[in-house]
Amino acid sequence: MKTKLIAPSLLSADFGNLQRDIEMLNESQADWVHVDVMDGRFVPNISFGFPIMQTVQQHAKKFVDVHLMIVEPEKYVEEFIEKGADLVSVHYEACVHLHRTVHLIQEKGAKAGVVLNPATPVLMLEDIIGDVDLVLLMSVNPGFGGQKFIENTYRKIAETKDLILSNNSTALIQVDGGVNLENAEKLFEAGADVLVAGNAVFSSADPAKTIELLKI
Ligand SMILES: O=C(CO)[C@@H](O)[C@H](O)COP(=O)(O)O
């Protein structure tokens, strides 16, 4: 997988015109489509589930990146993969048996990511870094789009990069939350490989142009 990737989050798309927004992403320079699944238990908000995932599967031509903000994600990963997820990321904080869940995702044919909330230290990944394809660092508390970026994410990117290098891991670093045209370049320079952007893309006058500018 190449780096400096943009993954627009469908959480900020217009659900009344979801096909239109996915087709816009297909034609844009977006690399991935980021799908935020929230259950109202792991996070204090409910977004959507399998029916929306089916719409994504029908229309998206880009790599589909699913972020599960749900308790007991191991119960649902297989169905998300059947419905087109190329990568499934699960929260460190939500998995009792993280190693088992990561390997389940990979056995079912998808890439596996592990997600850290802002208050979870990078060192918790020491014994799983060699198994995962991606580390997703939350730069806001998960649950809502349009929140303010938490600045200590830069330090966490550096720590994740060190962990990856010292373990000869090939995991990508993804950053999610409050990413915008002001901080994207700095985040890539700090070592992020994939930036998720919801509000910055879908609230802009020209989402396709914003995606292009986020990559510069
Ligand atoms: O996972 C989440 C929120 O929990 C994110 O993917 C947000 O959707 C990012 O939104 P912006 O901060 O870019 O609006």
Image: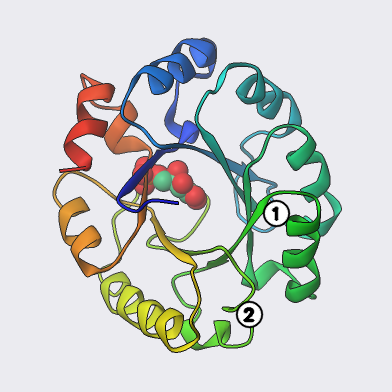
Query: Residue 115: which disc?
Result: none
Q: Residue 83 at what x, y percent from top left?
A: 75, 32
Few, some or many residues within 10 Å of mark 1 (<14, 14–19, 20+): many
Between the C-alphas of marks 1 and 2, the distance is: 20 Å
Q: Residue at x 33, y 23 (%)?
A: 28
Q: Residue at x 19, y 64 (%)?
A: 189
From where the camera sits, is residue 37 visible? Answer: yes
Question: Which image quadrant is residue 208 in?
Answer: top left
- What residue is disc 2 on? 128
Residue sitting farthest toward the right: 75
Q: Residue at x 65, y 17 (%)?
A: 58
Q: Position of residue 200 (x, y in %)?
A: 27, 37
Q: Position of residue 25 (x, y in %)?
A: 40, 23
Q: Amino acid at mark 1?
A: Ile
For marks 1 and 2, the one nearer the N-term is: 1
Image disc number at residue 70: 1
